[in-house]
Image (cartoon, grey):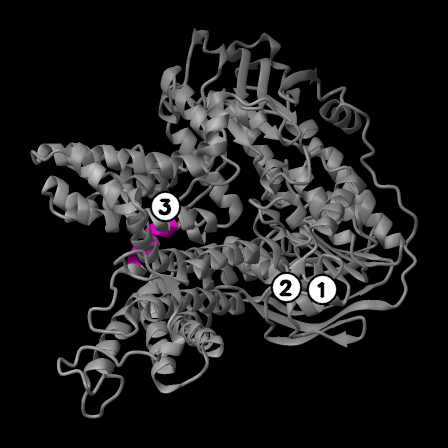
Amino acid sequence: MEHLSLPALWARYSPALVPILAVFTALVVGALLIGLTGADWQAAYIGLWEGSFGTPRALADTIIRSTPYIICGLAVALAFKAGLFNIGAEGQLYAGALCAVVVGTTLQLPPVFHIPLGIIAGALGGAAWASIAGILKARTGAHEVINTIMLNYIALRLTDWLIKSRQPLLLGDPTDTSGSRTPHIAETMRLPGFTLGNTNTLHLGILFAVILVFAVAWFFKRTTLGFELRMAGTNPSAARYAGISVPRSIILAMAFSGGLAGIAGAGEVMGVRYEVSTNFISGVGFDAIAVALLARGNPVGILFAGLLWGGLLTGARLMQVRAGLSIDVIKIVQALIIMFIAADQIVRFLYRIPQRKAGEETMVSKGWGGG
Amino acid sequence: MTQPGTQRPVVMEARQITKRFPGVTANDNVSLHLHQGEVLALLGENGAGKSTLMNILYGLYSQDAGEILVNGEPFRAKSPHASIARGIGMVHQHFQLVPVMTVVENVMLGNEMTRLGFLERRNAATQIREIGERYGLPVDPHALVADLDVGAQQRVEIIKALYRNADILILDEPTAVLTPQEADDLVRVMRTLTAQGKSLIFITHKLREVLEVADRIVVLRAGRVVGEADPATASETSLAALMVGRSVILTVDKNPAQPGDPVLTVRDLRVRDDRQLMAVDGISLEVRSGEILGIAGVQGNGQTELVQTLTGLRTSEGGRIAIADQTVTSASPRQISELGVAHIPEDRQRDGIVASYPLTENGILELYYLPPFARGIVRNEAAIVQHAEQLVAAFDVRTPGVHVAASALSGGNQQKFIVAREFSRKLKLLIAAQPTRGIDVGSIEFIHQQIIKKRDEGIAVLLVSAELDEILALSDRIAVMYHGHIVATVRNGDLSREQLGLLMAGGGGDEEQKNRGTEEQRS
């Protein structure tokens, strides 16, 4: 309809461009930091690449590691689309993992039933846990950020207690002398997969993750309920005007979000660990916020952001070996990525610069002109 | 009454101002001049470029081309501060006041007189009183702004500019929020100001006021000056034609109403507002099919709460609402909408559309879950797009397409789209709140005709408007709302404009005025 100037083109593609540039910039700054410590940044980054995506084995590890980030990232993004900040994916993931363990240790079923049941149990566990915050928000207006953070602490400590308690014996494994894990789940609930050499099993989880990515995208784009949740998040006043119950939308959105996080937990139990231990994956729920942010809530973007996140963590080990660096350098790079993404948003927010609108141009012309 | 200002010195001149925004030229070679002691009315539809021009004068934007002369010297405003220093003051449409601070504090804000680091409140208060007496702007300097009524808040805004020694005052749509009586007061203030040598630019789209107060009229359309008019010879019709670029029918042609059975019946309705005060205090009314009941009243007298309650967005304290013989006193918005009630909300940006969503989705805001727009839980995109296209075509909504965000449309087109959407449903009752607020004359004309058309089809219409002209143009019966009560219900034509204005202001009697004062103190 109109011919676009270069700035307009940039503006149009900035949703995808900004994250890519943020990653690039973070890697450049990371290289500078590595150089400052006296290490060889090239060797470090080659190690990072080979250890994450460079070999089939590394790729398999990256995919395994990325799966929960992708699913939890979707959880955060789903809530965000409905106008909610779900900081509680961590706790919901634990709730889902524990429910999956219960189903996996108490029932004996053929895999055809046991595996779906495990996933459903995980989803319900996460959904129930998240619903606490959702209901509190809908009924009393209590802010979901505070409540999901608090529910995280409760979930973590509760898990500890459920595993460690011996009198009464709850979810702990009586045969485990250290008292730090649950029994293993039945073989029938373990996710099938394949191994390459001596890698971990590349389980079906990534397939679920991909399906969920498209399911969430489809949900928001094509379903009436997705439209309701979106509208309740974007403009609650208009949603009320349109006859939508905003409290109901809040509760549903939190439950769906928690359900996804719960599936991530169940997947981790069923595909990788076969148990929940006191050193069960931690921090995924928090990093998922970063993944969702990096992808700007776009489900397909989350697939790539999650893979990047898992890749950075997986590749860090080889980077450490090659360049003699601390593994924490990767954490710095990750933090930088998020800062560059967030800073963009903060800047836009502070100066009320409209997204991909006339704003940028007037700013520039003001700077150059007499403004 | 004022001498035409042509012989007087020019205090401000804009020469060939051009300002472009991406995709639109807001000001295209605009030239105008302002004489000392005159009221220059700047008339134009929304989006004609009035505000852009004033924002350039006031230092909020900078022009791409052209120059501004103040008292004969070139002046390029870099900030409002610089403009104020050159004696240019602006009274914005939305008051720039801090409600929790007193009048003195508001007036001093940004221009604080201090002694030894302490605010010189007393000195400033004295000055405020002096300004008030000199220009007929009475206000208590120590009152909290939040406690003042709208007219008084506006006086504070004007005082603020005068306190900063403004000689040129820009008044942006100053009467939009005033009662007819308050507007008359403002006109008197404007006369006093010009008599004492101040020069005023009066921005408005209300034709009647322009003819009443202006010494000279400049009309803007689509960023250009399309004409200058002398209020002595111009008429409302000629100005409207100039504004819109074609002749406009200002009076709505309509036949006498043919009222049928009651569709909306309200008995003794009581509703609290957000502050828990009784905003609707025992209202009873009835709207029959095929008639328009207009609710006149100054904003904030309970009309908003009344409409919200009728549409299910607010719960009532007591009373009964029935629509088409069904009691809907505590029904949800959806239940009410499904009874065949359309609602044109007063705040279209907040309630009527989701600005960031495309027209396709905005077209099915309340209908998304019904066939043909939904098949089970899945949306039917083809039907949604087709529906939006129909709405756009039926109401001549100016848009590049149905996939653009609603925010890309002008206010008038957004409103046309909303009205089109509401009218596309099977209706029994139409509740239209401020249906033409802030939109251009052409769209107003169109929407008015459509409302009349719906009435003639036998729909009951409840029209709520703060514009008395609109009430008078459309209504068959008029109910005047004041402080949560309906103080009069009359047939349109039974009372004059002035009598209605008096009722809107609380009856006019001394007794009433006193009551009003005490009620305000309580809140």
Q: Judge left or right: residue B261 versus residue B362.
A: right
Q: Chain of mark 3?
A: A
- The residue carrying mark 2 is A243
Q: Is residue A291 magenta?
A: yes
- The residue carrying mark 1 is B337
Q: Chain of mark 1?
A: B
Mark number for residue A246?
A: none
- The magenta region covers A286-294
Magenta stretch secondary structure, dominant: helix
Crowd class of label 3 (few under 14; some 14 to 19; many from 20; radius 10 Å)? many
Crowd class of label 1 (few under 14; some 14 to 19; many from 20; radius 10 Å)? many
Q: Residue at x 25, y 60 (%)?
A: A283
- The residue carrying mark 3 is A294
Tell which residue pokes out farthest to the left in this image: A38
- Secondary structure under tag 2 reads loop
Question: Compared with residue B330, is residue B438 higher up or lower down, i.e. above or below?
Answer: above
Query: Type of residue at label 2?
Result: Gly
- Residue A252 image position (x, y, % from top left): 50, 68
Q: Is residue B374 magenta?
A: no
Q: Looking at the picture, tell me which residue is in the foreground, A157 or B39.
A: A157
Q: Judge left or right: residue A175 versus residue A133.
A: left
- Secondary structure under tag 1 reads helix
- Secondary structure under tag 3 reads helix
Tell which residue pokes out farthest to the front in this image: A197
Q: Looking at the picture, tell me which residue is in the foreground, B286 or A284.
A: A284
Picture quarter containing residue B509?
bottom right
Query: Type of residue at label 3?
Result: Leu
Q: Judge left or right: residue B325 versus residue A328.
A: right
Q: Residue at x 36, y 20 (%)?
A: A367
